[in-house]
Amino acid sequence: MFKFEELRVYQKAIRFSETIYSLTKDWPSLYRYNLTNQLQRAALSISLNIAEGSSRGKKDFQHFLSIARGSCYECIPLITLAERLKILSPKNKELLY
């Protein structure tokens, strides 16, 4: 096991990505290459930046954590739009928040 895998934030990021992929797998194909793909990539980017940053020095790791936080924030308008387009339920929106 790599050290970053022990981090709770990393474990939560993996669960978040898993939930995003699960909830978006049946979204209409109309949204597949824009909204769906963008949300999946943003969610996955969180754990990827945590993992990559953990291999660097402390200052670089902090930078990668900042990027991971930015990816998390990027998910917010995508989730909001998905709910407004009625492809994500209010319950699932709340779950993701």
Image (cartoon, rainbow, N blue to C red):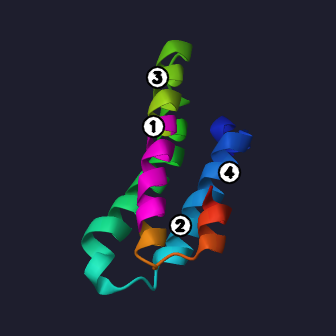
Residue type, label 3: His
Label 1 CA crowd tier, 10 Å (few <14, some 14–19, many 20+): some
Q: Name the spot of residue 14 as percent of width and height, x first.
A: 61, 55
Q: CA distance from mark 3 to mark 2?
A: 24 Å
Which mark is first along the chain, 1 or 2? 2
Q: Which sits in the foreground, 11 or 26?
A: 26
In this rendering, the label closer to the viewer, 3 or 1 = 1
Q: Which residue is mark 3?
A: 63
Residue type, label 2: Ile
Q: CA distance from mark 2 to mark 1?
A: 17 Å
Per the rendered image, the range of residues in magenta is: 69-81
**Does the stretch in magenta take in 95?**
no
Residue type, label 4: Lys
- The quarter in which the C terminus is drawn is bottom right
Q: Name the spot of residue 42 as percent of width and height, x first.
A: 42, 52
Q: Which residue is mark 2?
A: 20
Query: Residue 70's mark?
Result: 1
Q: Which residue is mark 4?
A: 12
Question: At numbered mark 2, what does the secondary structure look like: helix, strand or loop?
Answer: helix
